[in-house]
Image: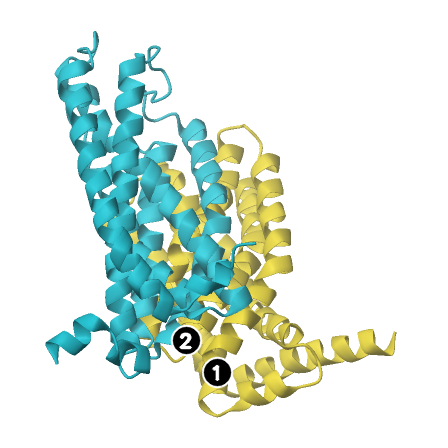
Amino acid sequence: MINWFKFSAPSTFYPLAGKLVPVFWLLAAIFGAIGLYIGFFVAPTDAQQGEGYRIIFIHVPASWMSMFIYCVMAFWSLLGLTFGTRLSGMMTTALAPTGALFAFLSLWTGALWGKPMWGTWWVWDARLTSELILFFLYLGYMALHAAIDDPRRADRAGAVLSLVGVVNVPIIYFSVKWWNTLHQGASVSLTKSASMASTMLWGMLIMALAFWAYTLAVALMRARAIMLEREANTEWVKHLPDIRRAA
Amino acid sequence: MPQLFAMFAAYFAALNRDLLLVMRRKTEVLTALFFFVIVTTLLPLGIGPEPDLLRKIAPGAMWIAALLATLLGLQRLFAADHADGTLEQMALSPEPLSILVAGKITAHWLVCGLPLVLLAPVIGLQFDLPTDAIGILMLSLLIGTPLLSLIGAIGAALTLGARGSALLVSLLVLPLYVPTLIFGAGAVESYITGLGAAGHLSLLGALLVLAIAFSPWATTAALRISLE
């Protein structure tokens, strides 16, 4: 039986995270290089969209990550509220900016892709709109967390918010979808795509892995910083080799 | 059974108290109402008085004004009770806090939501809506405004004691209002276009049931966090 709670204390998690960060950076670099190579050189030129479609290798993985990170945040929030672990709140806080970054990246690359393909930067499509709302939810989480001075309270309030948000995301998606079908404003169909070449799929999957590793690396780095900041007065921080060397 | 009665008594006590407080200071209610009227009056001034255009934007415009008017009252939902310690006494009460919270939310709806429903026909006439569409609009607001109060209460409880909470509530709550806005305004719109409003109203009702079940509970969790 593995003792899952061993690493739920910052004092044991901090060194573990320190060891994992370079590993995930390396993985991110390797997968990123492979994914970009496939994206730029291996994947065939699209018959309809020409070279412009290659933005898909950033756009789709970024969208996946933005949704996935929100679910992970909700997971940590649930864990934090049920077990009262300090680490859960730190992880949620550490993940939020990266999630917001990916949501923004997804919207931005989507706009850049939409302009040459559909002739417009933005359509009120269900996916675009719910991605934008997801971005707002990330901003709301970060604003709430920043507005409460006591970090423990901020963590718990943020946890409730992200759980409320995760229940709402599917509702928002379907409401926007039905709203969109009622209006039938945009004649663009995102789902009507030709059967995707398998190299394209592989490229996207590998880029998703790269983003995944990047997220882990950055979130762990951020979590380490948060741990030091919040636990600056504890014994384990004083006995850290890095701290003693600096002192 | 006596326990159930005690819970109902607690619910009505909380409701009664909040309504009484509001009646002693009527300006606060009237501000939100007046805000609703002013926003809906300014819109035609900004967009132009063509009846066709106004009829088209009426459902959306009135719904957005209703969202904003509900937001105005949200900060007051718990702030005063938090400041003078009443909320802590409520949390210590033998009755579940969520029952008291449900009473407060109901009071908020009666004060900030219901008047909007009753005012809607007048504003609807300003926008040249046909009479039967006004009926649908009132129905959608009747189902939708309690939903706004319920969702908003979570945001109000979360931001309690946070810096700049007034602005923060709108940032947290408005994205969560999206489905309500879509189904509420959509009901009127699809009725006008001849598709029938039943589908939208049913979905709105489903959301309301979901919110009645979960919102007092989530609000209570948030309140307990801010009372720590």
The residue under label 2 is A153
User: Image height check: is B136 above or below A51?
Assistant: below
The amino acid at mark 1 is Glu
User: Viewed as shown, does residue B124 lie left or right of B200?
Assistant: left
Residue in front for this viewpoint, B25 or A186? A186
Q: Which residue is drawn at the image coordinates 18% and 22% (left, top)? A: A39
Q: Position of residue A220 (x, y in %)?
A: 28, 56
From what the image shows, is residue B195 above or below residue B158? above
Q: Please report, as a chain letter, where disc 2 is located.
A: A
**Residue at position x 60%, y 66% from top?**
B217
Q: Which residue was labeled with disc 1? A: B228
Label 2 with label 1: CB-CB less than 8 Å: yes
Depicted B110 relative to depicted A170: above or below: below
Viewer-side residue, B75 vs A136: A136
Q: Residues within 10 Å of mark 1 (few under 14, many from 20)?
A: few
Please provide percent x and percent y for residue A150: 35, 79
- Picture colour for chain A: cyan
Question: Looking at the colours in the rendered structure, which chain would you say is drawn in yellow?
Answer: B
Q: Nearer the viewer, residue A237 or B129?
A: A237
